[in-house]
Image (spheres, rainbow, N blue to C red):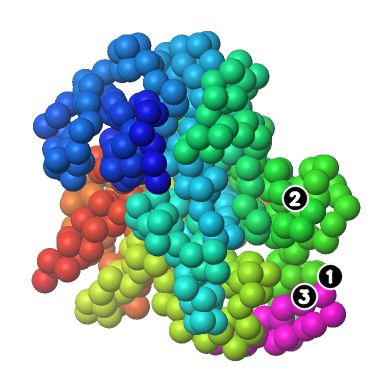
Amino acid sequence: MDFRGQRATVIGLAREGTALTRFLAEGGATVTVSDIKSREELSEGIEALVGLPIRFVLGGHPTEILEADVVFVSPGVPLEIPLLAEARRRGIPISSETRLFAQLCLAPIVGITGSSGKTTTTALVGGMLEKAGYRTWVGGNIGQPLIGHLTDIRPEDKVVMELSSFQLEFFAPWPRECATRMGNLAQGPFAFTGQGWSPSIAAILNITPNHLDRHPTMEVYTEAKVNILRYQGPGDVAVLGYDNPITSNLKSQISNLKSRPVLSFSLRTEVEQGAFVRDGKVVLRLGEEKWQICAVADVKLLGQHNVENVLAACAIAGAAGADPQSMAQVATTFAGVEHRLELVRTLRGVRYYNDSIATSPERTVAALRSFEEPIVLLAGGRDKHLPWEEMAQLTLRKVRHLVLFGEAAPIIERAIHNTAQQCHAQCTMRNAQLAIHRCDTLEEAVEVAARNAQPGDVVLLAPGGTSFDAFRDFAERGERFRELVGALL
């Protein structure tokens, strides 16, 4: 890629920002990187860029860094910060690593989003396509950014991307204020056309309340998700979750979907096109063809939500060209992605599971439903302004000990008490004497859980909140949990 003569500013030196900065600088662009963190806090990212002609502006975002043709933003940076508001006022195009990669990639892209299940489904689809013989690249919101591999990806390859709502915000058309600058860039290496962009195969697994600490309303959050399929063409494929009320209604609401077939997947209904369950078997129907992929009982992943992920993966991978045998082999052998109902250890008859990815109450509910055994639940972290009632109801039915930690501990405890009072007369609670323990840290929480667990119990880390009150991300929290569990005697 030849970016000589182009000026780019990259906001945020996290994983995507670092990869994009290297890609642009190696291509000859004049690159400025800005981050509110200090040089010491960003030492790892800066060290990865040693030797490249990059200007670093750290500790804040002065307006002088807007002397650029394009501003690239990391997904962790809110679009409402003053600097980006000023960029929009000046008509400067705002983009991201994901959007640039998507526009420059020569291979067809499979894009997968949803409020839950997207990482597991993405990994399943990638495995199915690879097993089917395709040279496959998996990335986006999972693994390493793909921008650094752009020149290695061939047109006949398959690219599978997990896409978050933050990444999908950049897939919308550019504002009209950017018209002049976009006209200058449209024929250049940044390949800006000003149009919205969607992948050739786009899946929305489900949409439920999530990230409302970042998106101002549920409607705004939903609009960001829908960008994944809003700009598809007539020959493209959309895959939608049939059991989710929002995604099941999208075909009638999105104009480019109304006149063409849409694949679905469902645990409860035999859909016309897509994947469903019949007589305990995963079934895939594409056009006039129909296959039994595997028995539901043979799916290795725990929980009904993971059976739903397998259904979604079969519909998506089938649309992308995978054969039924390859789908079956992956569906029945795939053991999961780390930090997602990951069995860490069995100690004195107690199984310890790491589901640190459960950063919303809905994800905690899915984890709780995956077990019939008595549960010692570790929950907490930072609240995302989401409803806790369903999680509280299930906790009252299935959890013996609730170990709370982090900023959200008092919020969860209040939800438990309120729910217990409201349903005292109506609810049948298996455990009316739920024990609640309050801890300051994850370290203390693991100690309390281990002390109270009995043989046959499951100790489950499924926090329901984000990790940002104490950890860099959910992965760091999950890794710390594994270390603590591994050290138990």
Residue 372 % position (x, y) = 49, 73
| Element carrying mark 2 | loop
Mainly helix, strand or loop, the magenta region? strand
Above-or-below relation of 347 to 55: below
Q: Determine the CA span between mark 3 and mark 1.
A: 9 Å
| Element carrying mark 1 | loop
Residue 280 highlighted magenta (yes or no): yes
Q: Determine the CA span between mark 1 and mark 2.
A: 22 Å
The residue tagged 1 is: 272
Left or right of 469, for residue 228? right
Mark 2 is on which residue type? Gly
Q: Residues within 10 Å of mark 3 (few under 14, many from 20)?
A: some
Q: Which badge, 3 or 1, comes first in the chain's sequence?
A: 1
The residue tagged 3 is: 286
The residue tagged 2 is: 233
Give the number of the mark in front: 2 or 3.
2
> Which residues make up the magenta segment?
279-299
Q: Which badge, 1 or 2, comes first in the chain's sequence?
A: 2
Above-or-below relation of 4 to 431: above
Residue 76 % position (x, y) = 39, 35
